[in-house]
Image: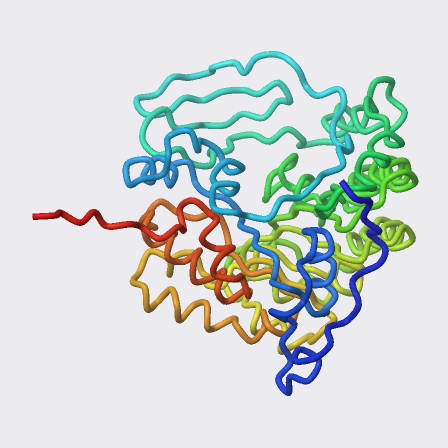
């Protein structure tokens, strides 16, 4: 494989693309790009041969339905389904910035009920989980952190110097990925979401009032670990994007007040984003469902410049955010998943709703969460084909993707 210089991008388009009166980064006469070049140019509002094709995944029940409707049975996880539908590949840098060693041991069944069971996890969490029907998020009865003593058990597992935490050689990884033609990503952490999981929604809400110092210590401790491990990785590996996770918003907004988020969370995020930017990482996103509108300006101020997955129904609309923030903001997702279960016209209408933002750049459109089970397989095939047309894919490239190939109808000869 030819070496790829990831710190540079192809020359701007010339000819027809340079003369277009309407802003449109999609340039059909542009030379074919590598996945890495295409990602970097898409997310920097520069012309591309076509826009990046990514998706967010599928519910287990969706794959089970699609197997009955034509999806090959061996496509049994998100990665295999995405590869089958031609989703652009990525590379990933491993980073052990979580609890280590993890809590060990087997979950203990405390009570068996008719349709569920109550179990205690090794970290002390007690939850009820369904034993039949559609799998759902567990119902939490007791969370792992309810006091400072509980926090001590976690804090000792967040020590960056614990022997055995780092088992990879970042120099070797950096040498291998230097020639990669795929965009390279790295984990950038969670600054409130994991802490909410450990203490529970009500628990973390009460701690913010009753013991704010403890909440700040929890966030500072996890950030210390992130900075330590990221520093080691970024000194050896050239990275294109950083990805985090929060999920701290409902349909009516965040679970923490924007004021408190700005006071106790944003300063810790800035420690990580400043480190990323020092090493040339300019695309930084976090994953947060629900209506993120009130947190977007705080994330932008903190250095997180890309929003994902942009759930449209609660109000996290990519069209709205581009109108509000222009090129300050990068976007991923934002196609309303439930509309894919409707007719072809509704699918086309949803794609056309975001088309202008796609053409402006800085946006990778895909489902605004995992594709649900009410989406028929044929609808998803149609959606993918139409989406790729919008992204500037050439007809011959679309038809190289197995489920999108033209179907031949058998002709009966009399």
Query: Is residue 171 shown left or right of residue 72?
Result: right
Question: In the picture shown, does residue 162 fall above or below 292?
Answer: above
In this rendered view, identify the residue nearer to me: 192 or 341. 341
In this rendered view, identify the residue nearer to me: 278 or 111. 278
Judged from this view, the residue extending furthest toward the bottom is 21
Judged from this view, the residue extending furthest toward the left is 414
Question: In the picture shown, does residue 238 fall above or below 97?
Answer: below
Could you tell me which residue is drawn at 72 percent across and 26 percent down? Answer: 150
Could you tell me which residue is drawn at 47 percent across and 73 percent down? Answer: 353
Query: Is residue 413 shown left or right of residue 332?
Result: left
Question: In the picture shown, does residue 91 fall above or below 19?
Answer: above
Quarter placement of the N terminus: top right
Percent coordinates x, y for residue 350 in the rendering:
43, 68
Percent coordinates x, y for residue 281 in the rendering:
82, 53
Query: Is residue 264 shown left or right of residue 115?
Result: right
Q: Quadrant of residue 180?
A: top right
**How many numbered discs sit on the rendered protein?**
0
Judged from this view, the residue extending furthest toward the front is 414
Percent coordinates x, y for residue 378 in the rendering:
32, 51
Percent coordinates x, y for residue 162 in the rendering:
86, 21
Instruction: Say whether residue 259 is visible.
Output: no
Instruction: Say whether residue 106 is visible.
Output: yes
Could you tell me which residue is drawn at 47 percent across and 39 percent down? Answer: 81
Image color mode: rainbow
In this rendered view, identify the residue nearer to me: 342 or 15. 15
Could you tell me which residue is drawn at 83 percent across and 24 percent down? Answer: 166
Query: Is residue 312 shown left or right of residue 232?
Result: left
């Amino acid at each position: 494989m030819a070496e790829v210089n990831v710190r540079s991008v192809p020359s701007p388009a010339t000819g027809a693309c340079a003369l277009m009166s309407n802003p449109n980064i999609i340039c059909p006469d542009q030379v074919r790009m590598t996945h890495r070049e295409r990602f970097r140019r898409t997310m920097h509002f520069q012309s591309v041969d076509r826009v990046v094709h990514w998706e967010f995944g599928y519910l287990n029940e969706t794959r089970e339905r699609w197997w009955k409707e034509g999806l090959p049975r061996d496509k049994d996880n998100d990665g295999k389904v995405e590869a089958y539908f031609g989703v652009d590949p990525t590379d990933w840098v491993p980073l052990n910035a979580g609890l280590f060693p993890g809590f060990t041991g087997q979950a203990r069944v405390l009570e068996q009920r008719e349709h569920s069971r109550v179990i205690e996890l090794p970290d002390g969490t007690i939850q009820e989980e369904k034993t039949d029907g559609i799998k759902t998020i567990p119902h939490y009865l007791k969370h792992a952190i309810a006091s400072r003593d509980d926090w001590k058990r976690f804090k000792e597992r967040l020590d960056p110097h614990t022997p055995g935490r780092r088992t990879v050689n970042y120099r070797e990884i950096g040498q291998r990925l230097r020639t990669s033609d795929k965009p390279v990503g790295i984990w950038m952490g969670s600054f409130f979401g994991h802490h909410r999981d450990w203490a529970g929604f009500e628990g973390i809400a009460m701690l913010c009032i009753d013991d704010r110092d403890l909440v700040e210590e929890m966030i500072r401790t996890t950030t210390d670990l992130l900075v330590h491990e990221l520093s080691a990785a970024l000194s050896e590996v050239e990275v294109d994007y950083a990805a985090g996770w929060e999920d701290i918003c409902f349909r009516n907004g965040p679970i923490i007040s924007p004021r408190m988020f700005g006071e106790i969370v944003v300063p810790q995020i800035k420690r990580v984003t400043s480190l990323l930017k020092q090493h040339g990482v300019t695309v930084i996103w976090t994953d947060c469902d629900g209506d993120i509108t009130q947190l977007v300006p705080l994330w932008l101020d903190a250095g997180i410049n890309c929003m994902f997955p942009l759930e449209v129904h609660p109000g996290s609309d990519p069209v709205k955010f581009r109108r509000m923030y222009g090129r300050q903001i990068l976007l991923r997702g934002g196609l309303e998943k439930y509309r894919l279960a409707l007719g072809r016209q509704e699918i086309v209408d949803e794609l056309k709703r975001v088309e202008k933002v796609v053409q402006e750049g800085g946006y990778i459109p895909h489902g605004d969460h995992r594709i649900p089970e009410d989406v028929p397989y044929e609808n998803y095939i149609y959606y993918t084909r139409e989406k790729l047309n919008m992204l500037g894919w050439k007809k011959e490239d679309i038809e190289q993707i197995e489920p999108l190939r033209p179907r031949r109808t058998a002709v009966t000869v009399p």
